[in-house]
Every structure is written in structure tokens, then in C-alpha cells.
């Protein structure tokens, strides 16, 4: 099971990349870190000076390269990253089938 990114999220990522002058060869790093009110938090960041490790997952979607380290991938397999600017809240949202509990803001989870 791979990680998927909705068309809305891809569009917003591209807009951010343009706004911040992120090099086209930069990776979007998607990860999981300890923290948050539910124990784990999602992390999104651009990185242009990174070399994927042998066990990392690299996805190429349109003109975007996505890098997920193996530890994070264990938590994120099957997850969809979406973006919304509607009434349910502005920003990126993770739909993670592995999460047994999420906080009310949707930025942290536990398994």
C-alpha cells in the first residue's frame, strides 16, 4: 500500500513550491515524529540536499518527488494526503487507515 496525494494537495504543494522558490529537484519529505496530543505527528517539508536511503520509499507524482523514510512509512502506508480550504478547515489533512485515534485538530494520531 502506497501513500497517495490528492489533486488538490498536489496543486497546493506546487503553489507553495513556487512561492518559496523550492528547486524542482527537491523532495517533499513526508514523515511521522513523536509528539502531539495523541503521540505521533505528521511532518511535511521540502529537502533538496537529501539522498534517499535504500529502504526509503520514493514516489514520483507528476513533477513531484515524495520521500518517506522507512519508519514513517510503517505508520503511513495507505494514507491519503489531501488539502482543503473549506469550512472543515484550511490546510493539509491526512486520511490514515492505520490511526486508531486522532486528536481533534487532526495533526496527531496514535496506532
Image (cartoon, helix red, strand yellow):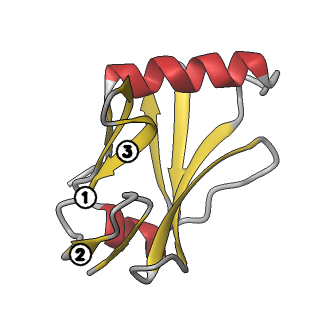
Q: Is disc 1 surrounded by few (<14), some (14 to 19) or many (20+) residues within 10 Å?
A: some
Q: Where does label 3 land, which residue?
A: 93
Hey, which residue is sitting farthest front in the picture? 87
Mark 1 sits on what residue?
Answer: 96
Using the image, determine if residue 34 lies above or below residue 91: below
Q: Tell me if mark 3 has few (under 14), some (14-19) or many (20+) residues whose alpha carbon lies within 10 angstroms of its own.
A: some
Q: Is residue 94 or residue 52 the one in the foreground?
A: 94
Q: CA distance from mark 3 to mark 1?
A: 9 Å
- Tell us which disc is closer to us: 3 or 1: 3
Query: Is residue 62 at least partly visible in the picture?
Result: no
User: Residue 82 in the image: x percent, y percent?
Assistant: 34, 35
The front one of 47 and 17 is: 17
**Could one spot residue 50 in this view of the protein?**
yes
The answer to whether residue 46 is above or below residue 101 is: above
Residue at 45% over, 79% down: 37
Gap between marks 1 and 2 measured at Cα: 10 Å
Q: Earlier in the sequence, mark 1 or mark 2?
A: 1
Residue under pointer 2: 101
Residue 71, position as x, y percentages in the image:
46, 76
The earlier-in-sequence mark between 3 and 2 is 3
Image quadrant containing the N terminus: bottom left
Amino acid at each position: 500500500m502506497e501513500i497517495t496525494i490528492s489533486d488538490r494537495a498536489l496543486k497546493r504543494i506546487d503553489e507553495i513550491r513556487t512561492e518559496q522558490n523550492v528547486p524542482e529537484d527537491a523532495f517533499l519529505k513526508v514523515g511521522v515524529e513523536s509528539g502531539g496530543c495523541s503521540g505521533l505527528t505528521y511532518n511535511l517539508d521540502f529537502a533538496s540536499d537529501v539522498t534517499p536511503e535504500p529502504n526509503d520509499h520514493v514516489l514520483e507524482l507528476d513533477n513531484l518527488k515524495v520521500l518517506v523514510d522507512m519508519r514513517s512509512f510503517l505508520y503511513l502506508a495507505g494514507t491519503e494526503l489531501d488539502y482543503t480550504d473549506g469550512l472543515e478547515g484550511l490546510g493539509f489533512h491526512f486520511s490514515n487507515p492505520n490511526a486508531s485515534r486522532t486528536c481533534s485538530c487532526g495533526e496527531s494520531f496514535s496506532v
